[in-house]
Image: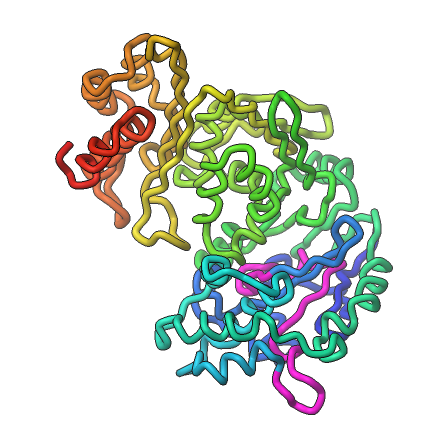
Amino acid sequence: MTDCIRFILNGEDIALSSVDPTETLLDFLRLRRQLTGTKEGCAEGDCGACTVLVGRLRGGKLCYETVNACIRFVGSLHATHVVTVEHLAAVDGSLHPVQQALVDCHGSQCGFCTPGFVMSLYGLWLSSSNPSRPEIEKALQGNLCRCTGYEPIVKAAEQVAHARPSALFDPLERDRANIMARLWNLQNRDTITVSKEGRRLVVPGTLAALADILAAEPEATIVAGATDVGLWVTKQMRLLSPVVFVNHLTELQGIETDEIGITLGSGVTYTQALGTLGAEIPALGRLIDRIGGQQVRNMGTIGGNIANGSPIGDMPPALIALGATVKLRSASGVRMLPLEEFFIDYGKQDRRAGEFVERIHIPRLAQENRFAVYKISKRRDEDISTLCGAFRLELDDENVVTGIRIAFGGMAATPKRARAVEAALHGRPWTESAIAEAREAFERDFTPLTDWRASAEYRRLTAKNLLTRFFLETSGTPQELMRFATGEV
């Protein structure tokens, strides 16, 4: 065991032997290091003013991703390279091409959000020399600005895309080999334990070590991406201890596909999963593109979204409709569980003492199956679901329903199947009259709540309308779709 968190900050080696388990990277940068270019706007991973890059060795390569420093804990940074806006300019003060483009295109007014935009554009600049406008807009999903209207910022991204001065100018290209060597020297399989004022954080070196730690301390808080736990700290002011960080465990980051289906390690982030899930199940790819901003997708994990058990989590309804199962592991063994059975009640999951979610298995979607998932939210991007509905349908040659699974989030205390609706449709022809009758079964399946996102009445009506939408999209003519879109049906 060791007692020190080590990482690289811009060009400096950092070693911390005293760290609060919930100290955020933002506070560390601003309060401990006086790197005040990184701003606090929302403290919940929404506005992007705190955006920095975090690089990590992955598959023999050094990969950088934008993250929200306001909800990223220092304890999760071992063996990483943290890059802030101060690192971009040259020693003589010359601006980086990304920064200069924002100046040239008048992409800054009050300036508060500008460093975060710079870092998001820099992350895009590093990964693509010819981004399309949709790719630029996607890279900026997680950054909010009250002044410019975004067009000058998008123009700056377009202008700088091909600006590639000597590699010696860009700090990450210039020092890549050196940074990789230094990060490689920080890799280890030892468990790290650090404490401050009686509160502890633990970074297990292996999956077996994680199981042993949780067996000894089953009440420990497991943190992967911190996109939700971060808000426990910044908004609810919770004092957590011990905190066990797992975002570095490569054993939890595997993605496997075969004729049976797709298996994801619970530590796979949305960004890592997007390529495979988007190719295998396009509707899931479209859903992931609407989860948070790019920074959140780079941090948040599929397993964390499940283990957190939120009734409005985006992924569980889709995964339940697909028939996913979870593999739970502890020091005493493993067990498999249908995902729909994992959720017991609000804030309560079938996770025994010492257990953690190790893997998620998604059965392969048969070619003849129809599948769709619909997320309803006040904003299209970067917003929590008001409700989310997922539908999987199988029809025989006579257009009769031989299999159907429907699941919703935001309609009950847990993500939940619409079993009465399924029963009303199973064995019946897939017709408008069958859908009309099945809509009434929603009253038996769900008793939604009224909150600031939507009324119970809105949720019930929207759930019914999503069933009608799915029917029209899987069997309707363009004229019927237009009738639905204009409110005639």
Question: As drawn, is 383 to the left or to the right of 79?
Answer: left
Outermost residue, left direction?
488
**Where, by quadrant of the figure, is residue 345 drawn?**
top left
Q: Residue 431, relative to residue 147: is it above or below?
A: above
Can you give x and y, in whole percent of width and height, for residue 394 in the image?
41, 17
- Residue 379 is inside the magenta segment: no
Question: As drawn, is 166 to the left or to the right of 42?
Answer: right
Outermost residue, front direction?
478
Residue toward you, 246 or 118: 118
Q: Residue 220, relative to residue 234: is it above or below?
A: above
Q: Is residue 41 visible?
A: yes
The residue that appears at 68% across and 53% down in the rendered structure is: 201
Q: Is the magenta stretch mostly helix, strand or loop?
A: loop
Q: What stretch is highlighted in magenta?
A: 66-95
The residue that appears at 28% across and 11% down in the rendered structure is: 429
Can you give x and y, in whole percent of width and height, for residue 282 in the image?
49, 37
Residue toward you, 420 or 157: 157
Question: As drawn, is 454 to the left or to the right of 58?
Answer: left
The residue that appears at 65% across and 90% down in the rendered structure is: 93
Numbered marks: total: 0
Residue toward you, 298 or 308: 298
- Residue 71 is inside the magenta segment: yes
Can you give x and y, in whole percent of width and height, for residue 193 in the image?
75, 53
